[in-house]
Image (cartoon, rainbow, N blue to C red):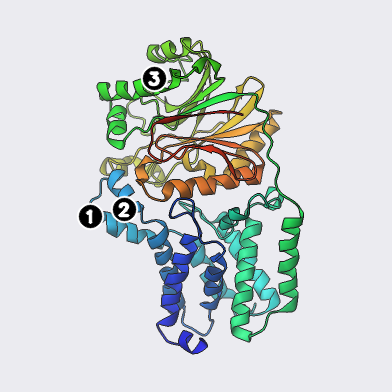
Amino acid sequence: MIGILKHKFALPVLHVLAGIIYALNFPFIGEFTIFPTIFISAAIIFYGLDKERRFKFNLLNIFLFCWGYNLAGYYWLMFTLNEFGGLFFPFNFLVWQLFSLVIAPQFYLFLIIFYFLRDRIKLESLIGGIFYCLVFVILEIFTPQQFPALFGHPWLKISPYLKPAKYLGQPFYSFLTLYIGHLIFSFSKKRRLPSFAAVAILVLLSANFLMGPIKNELNNELNIRVVQGNIGNDLKLKSEQGVRLAASEVVNIYKSMSLNDGIDKMDLVIWPETSYPRFVFTKLNKKVNAELSELFINSNSKYFIGTYDLASTKPDVLENTYNATILASKDGDIEQAYHKQVLIPFGEGLPFGPLNKYVAPYLTNVSLFAKGKSFTNFKVKDKGFISLICYEVLFPRYVSKYLNAVKERGEKVDFIVNVTNDSWYGPYSEQEQHLFLAKWRAVEFGLPIIRATNTGISSVILQDGSELIRTKNFEQTNMDFKF
């Protein structure tokens, strides 16, 4: 085996396979993953860090790892670039391939740090192993990423035995993955396991399970409906571009689905991200327009709706709209609003600061949203909840910041509502991947999550990461439950 690995093409091929294995530890066919092979990916990363080899060779291997990861994990980007960006083959294929360069920047940074410290801290040593694993975990936490799928996330498959996550978060499991990978690497090098390191891993794993399962707590005091309208991209775009018939069709779909089957029994009705295609202007007007007022009067429920809120009516303001959620009463009053703060680069905004106004005319497929500033805690009866829009749910530091801001005001949070629209990603694995990663916020913060989506998958995530109820992908349906 060692002889084979010494072949000049062995390591590059091995890194491609390691990247593919890494991706397949996340959902790729339904909910199915190949966990715990994530340890093999970690071992290969360490095995490839040979200080005697030239930096360029190791850099190539890291790129090949990321290319394999992109190939197996983000194949749906070709569809997205076509639907969302208007790029056709082969341009969508080429841009997807370039994504390998930025998909996981923490791997490239780790390589640079290793080369800087390789002669001072030996990778093969006990202390070196712990040090480099901790360095990688820190890089995972603080390196900006478009879609942060990390070494610790596949451990969700052992739910409900994830109690340490409430105190140490997902990084605890990233460290376990990396250090188990380092043990495999050490054994391949020395043909023996460092006894102390092996015992330490066994102690940590035992402690994880001895802490017992996470307990789910629901009071069943609220009757909630999530409306999954399943609005196709063509109809959605036309409705948002001001085509009156298209907008009316979308609104009528949501209204009819909200009112059927005993709506008077619902305390809260939730519509997904940007489901209401018309603008509100909460700065000046705290009332919804007539078409929604009619709906609210005919029901006895509060409505939580994803929509667009104007930041300014001045035509010269570039970022004049918020991606927003609003909570409206049965009287048509907009009680509270939240504006999305974590915007998708090149999807919802541009990263060029004062140059944005000069670049924007050439990037017509990019929406230019204003960035929200306030942390809203919504209230239904005596329950409080926060709103996360789309992939805001993927960033634990942002969720922590949001929760801390609410708690500093002396307000309680009983659950999280995550509204999103994953229709841009096609009938592939993105919806399951997004949901899989969102479950970690429920585990880490001990709060259930109601996930409302346009085309699926809508779900109620419990504190242990399991699901109370879910919808199928690409179906028009309601999800009713007690909470």
The three-letter amino acid code for the residue at tag 3 is Ser
Q: Of label 3 and label 1, which has the lower sequence position? A: 1
Q: Amino acid at mark 1?
A: Phe
Q: Is residue 365 visible?
A: yes
Residue 317 image point, x, y percent = 36, 30
Tell me where residue 298 appears, x and y as whole percent.
Answer: 46, 10
Q: Which residue matches tag 3?
A: 256
Left or right position of 89 against 208: left
Q: Between residue 133 and residue 423, name the one nearer to us.
A: 423
Q: Secondary structure at mark 1?
A: loop
Among the two numbered marks 1 and 2 on one chain, the one whose residue lies closer to the N terminus: 2
Q: Tell me the residue at 46%/76% (across/down).
A: 58
Name the mark on residue 89.
1
- Mark 1–mark 2 distance (CA, rounded to whole Å): 8 Å
Q: Is residue 319 left or right of residue 233?
A: right
Q: Position of residue 240 (x, y in %)?
A: 32, 29
Q: Residues within 10 Å of mark 3 (few under 14, many from 20)?
A: few
Q: Relative to 397, does residue 478 appear above or below in the rendering?
A: above
How far apart marks 2 and 3 lie (CA) works out to: 34 Å
Residue 228, quarter of the rendered image = top left
Q: Is residue 303 above or below residue 125?
A: above
Name the element at disc 3. helix
Q: Which residue is mark 2?
A: 78
Q: Name the residue rendered at 61%, 30% in the picture.
A: 385
